[in-house]
Image (cartoon, rainbow, N blue to C red):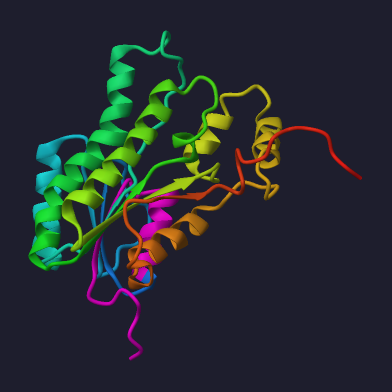
Amino acid sequence: MEKKEFDQKVVVVTGGSKGIGKSTAEYFLEKGASVSVWDITEWKGSLSEKMLFIQCNVSKEIEIQQALSATLAAFNKINILVNNAGIQRYATVTESSESEWDEVMNVNLKSAFLCSKHCIPFMQSVKKGVIINVSNVQAFISQQNVAAYTTSKTALLGLTRSIAVDFAPAIRCVAVCPGTIDTPMLRDAIQLSPNPAAVLQECNDMHLSGRIGTPEEVAALIGFLASDSAGFMTGQAVRIDGGLGISIPGSKRD
């Protein structure tokens, strides 16, 4: 049987029940890894012998510890952690309630801290590991009305650098920063508009690619960054954003 790229590797994907997380879990499974998905939302679909689903809130340390114990019992080790869990709330600083702010920070940032904290010792025990933090292009640019979200995604870049510096050379840590991706979270947000079709077209148009991205495209990048082919990459933020935010409106020449 042909050896696959991630044979003998164990991957944890948080927020892996839908969107980028689900595509990432499926990517690693296809490439031969054993995958443990941690998510508060139930997994829809079949489970193979190389996949474990654990329903948990990854902003709660006790639930992370329980999920980690179950993963180790099933697969005996952890090689790759993908901190993908995330939520979006729409509000400015003055409009955000303390509870909404804390909710976004807990899910988007605290979960990555806690999952890394508890997974790193097991990566150290095998002297090699990779952590991928799923940030966002809004770590560099920002739309209106997303104060908590853009703050949390920017902070993930600092966490990425810190992990990379503190645990090198055995452990690499890289951030992935998607632009607008066709996920259930995006579709739900668009439905809040009185004209969803117009909002979707606007999302397509603001990317140089002329379209929004797919979860599969982001998953493929995560897979590359977790592979030995990216072994010289650490501490960096990699944008996969269709050129969003790099062009300046101005005159055009025929």
Q: Which portion, as a residue range, is magenta?
A: 1-29
State the residue in front, 21 or 188. 21
Asked whether, in this view, residue 71 is left or right of residue 1, the answer is: left
Q: Is residue 80 visible?
A: no
Image: 176 above or below 136: below
Measuring 53% from the left and 30% from the top, which residue is drawn there? Answer: 189
Q: Is residue 163 visible?
A: yes
Asked whether, in this view, residue 200 is left or right of residue 60, the answer is: right
Hey, which residue is sitting farthest top in the picture?
A: 94
State the residue in front, 137 or 48. 137
Query: Could you tell me residue 94's position as x and y percent?
Result: 42, 8
Quadrant assignment, res 39: top left
Does residue 189 belong to the magenta stretch?
no
Query: Could you tell me residue 155's position as x and y percent?
Result: 33, 34
Measuring 52% from the left and 37% from the top, which residue is drawn there? Answer: 186
Image: 110 above or below 30: above
Image: 5 above or below 119: below
Quadrant assignment, res 168: bottom left
Query: Could you tell me residue 111's position as x and y percent?
Result: 23, 38
Measuring 92% from the left and 45% from the top, which residue is drawn there? Answer: 254
State the residue in front, 137 or 82. 137
Hey, which residue is sitting farthest bottom in the picture?
A: 1
Query: Could you tell me residue 86's position as x and y percent?
Result: 36, 38
Does residue 17 belong to the magenta stretch?
yes
Question: How many numbered discs?
Answer: 0
Image: 133 above or below 220: above
Asked whether, in this view, residue 128 is left or right of residue 24, the answer is: left
Measuring 33% from the left and 85% from the top, which residue is drawn there? Answer: 3
